[in-house]
Image (cartoon, rainbow, N blue to C red):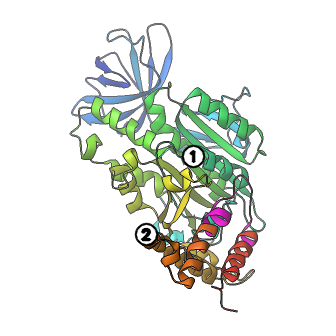
Amino acid sequence: MRLAEHRYRSISSIRGPLVFVERVFQARIGETVTLIAPDGKELDGEVLKIDGKQALIQVFGETHGLDLDKTSVTLHDSVKRVPLSKACLGRLFNGSFEPIDGAPMYIPESWGAVSGAPINPVARGYPSEVIETGISSIDGLNTLVKGQKLPIFSSAGLPAQELVTEILRNSRLPGEGAFAVVFIALGLTFHEFNFFQRILDQMSNQFVAFINLASEPVVERLLAPRLGLTVAEDLAFNHGMDVLVVVTDITNYCDALREVSTSREELPGRRGYPGYMYSDLASLYERAGRLLGRPGSVTMLPVLTMPEDDITHPIPDLTGYITEGQLVFSRELHQKGIFPPIDVLPSLSRLMQHGIGEQQTRGDHRQIANLLYQSYAKGRDLRKLEAVVGKEGLLKEDRVMLEMADSFEATFVHQGQERRDIGQTLDLGLQLLKQYGVYPE
């Protein structure tokens, strides 16, 4: 077992963020690496692949200036670790965990492996208890539960960033408890970065942000989610906090994964993405959860953009297999000026019942949600019939359902930048049901 650092000057090739080193002795995958360029610049990396005595190193930074003969490579015989402390709250970092808010780096209380500590399935607590997002179509009909992973499926041109903004501002626990948000933004333009920075400046210090810009190294796009999740696990399981992790945009992450895979000359899978993308995404999503008998939870809201509005594309397809539901954006609702344009019919929270089962505030949550779903689905179907026979050709009760569907979209789904707690959401749903004679008295 090697317990010492080894230094090499045997680089055979540099391809973008990847460096090939020959004649390596007892390297291991995931081992941390330091590269020193001829001008003295230091770069961090990790061993990505081992083939005999050749090691493939992934560099966290730009490889410009590295030289095949004069660059030294040091393998440290340790995995990449993350500085952990509650002092991270209220701070902004880049994809390499360097502060970008102008303040110095905090003093860590401990260090954690970037890959996290896998949760033993036997030790997993079942997701329960609600996290309020302030969005009626989520809280009322697709409730987010502590420990859940619930992705948002958006499309190009739809206001996913605006919804993320509202979730950052308005998410909280319905009762008492320590709560924090870990925000991970991948592949942002400068305009998008400035937009989110203004939002974060308005928030309290109960957040940590990891920002990767589109102009920054692509491998940082792969590292940032793991840094953020390691911090979230520390806050949740060592400090007893309920942590909501918001990641935008998973599509940028997967594109970075494809780019690195292509540089490694790996055999491509569907749409050019690597065949291991499913397990790679699972290594992120499955870090959400709770531990039996311990306070704290990690809940995930990953946002992804469906290429060409295709829900069968590998990214949403694989994400749907791993996660517990989805929130689907509708282009039709967006064109009507409805915000957020969440189409509640194809949306689903598989763990909703476990969060609202005991909640009877302002009527039965499950009953209100079911009646709203039934009425809206019927009204949506009647729109097709109305296009054929006209509104006058419909039965009176059908016209009522048609009006209710319109009212549901205009008053329940649409809320602009107004925040509604769960009580207000259920009151509004109950009012709609009674107004159109659907709720049994």
- The residue pinned by badge 2 equals 384
Q: Secondary structure at mark 2?
A: helix
Q: Earlier in the sequence, mark 2 or mark 1?
A: 1
* Residue under the image location 57 percent in, 68 percent down: 142
Pick the front one: 405 or 348: 405
Where residue 431 sits in the image (x, y, percent)?
72, 77
Query: Residue 241's image quarter?
Result: bottom right
Q: Reply above or below: 308 against 299.
A: above
Kind of residue indicated by mark 1: Pro
Identify the magenta region. Answer: 408-423
- The residue pinned by badge 1 equals 159
Pick the front one: 211 or 272: 272
Where residue 224 sits in the image (x, y, percent)?
52, 39
Examine the structure image and report whether residue 413 is included in the region drawn in magenta.
yes
Q: Horizontally, is 441 left or right of 14 in the view?
A: right
Q: Residues within 10 Å of mark 2 (few under 14, many from 20)?
A: few
